Amino acid sequence: MKNIAVLVSGGGTNLQALIDAEKSGIIKNGKITCVIASKPGVYALERAAQNGIKSLVIPRKDYADIASYTRAVTDALLAEKADLVVYAGFMTILDEQIFRAFPYKMMNIHPALIPSFCGKGFYGLHVHEAALAAGVKLSGATVHFVTEVCDGGPIIMQKAVPVENGDTPETLQKRIMEQAEWKILPEAVSLFCQDRIKVVDGKAVVD
């Protein structure tokens, strides 16, 4: 059984999708053992408490720079014996220390079809604003391994979602969460926990 640690910064809707998936048996051979938040008082911590999951708060503002903050988060994850680290709306880009500690053992959900609308600055509603401005007819979500390149790690799963006439960033965000993010993130986590994902020549191959 693999230990899953989830990093959060906000409401924790993707954390809730993972909790629900674990309870319903979608996630096989994995258990959420720890939730780490980058600031106190976020609703994701309440979700963890309601489900009996241990949580830690490591406030970004308490650290002078990204190196010292990354070290603190990495040390906490190592202490928790995390086998998989899931970024679920975690808003801080950590440095290479954590990638060395957890190579191809960290995954993120991004609310677009990478390589479109990704990289530094593309987060939250900014992603959907950019998609609508470009006039794309399909958007969606991508689960990928986290590496030192922001949103540049091997792609594990993707799911397309239609863009509809009259969409706002908010309506598109909601549709992508409900139809894509909350489905493929638990599936990808389950595949990892069953040792069914390999990285070959820089690409993720699902067995």
Image (tube, grey):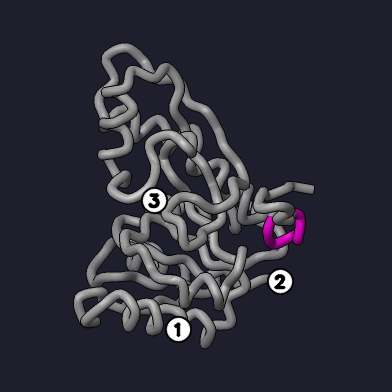
Q: Nearer the viewer, mark 1 or mark 3?
A: 1
For the residues labelled 2 and 1, the Cα–Cα distance comes to: 20 Å
Q: Amino acid at mark 3?
A: Thr
Can residue 180 be seen here?
Answer: yes
Q: Judging from the image, what secondary structure is the residue with disc 3 in?
A: helix
Mark 2 neighbour class, 10 Å CA radius: few under 14, some 14 to 19, many 20 or more:
few
Q: Main secondary structure of the magenta part?
A: loop
The residue tagged 1 is 76
Q: Amino acid at mark 2?
A: Met
Residue ID at (79%, 48%): 207
Q: Is residue 149 left or right of residue 21?
A: left
The residue tagged 3 is 13
Nearest to the observer: residue 195 or residue 186: 195
In the rendered image, residue 149, in percent from the top left (x then y), is placed at 46, 56
Q: What range is drawn magenta here?
A: 192-196
The residue tagged 2 is 1
N-terminal label among 3 and 2: 2
Q: Are marks 1 and 3 in contact (CB under 8 Å)?
A: no
Q: Are marks 3 and 2 in contact (CB under 8 Å)?
A: no
75 in relation to 28, above or below? below
Mark 3 neighbour class, 10 Å CA radius: few under 14, some 14 to 19, many 20 or more:
some
Residue ID at (59%, 67%): 84
In the rendered image, residue 15, in percent from the top left (x then y), is placed at 44, 57
In the rendered image, residue 71, in percent from the top left (x then y), is placed at 40, 83
Nearest to the observer: residue 131 or residue 95: 95
For the residues labelled 3 and 2, the Cα–Cα distance comes to: 24 Å
Residue ID at (75%, 61%): 195
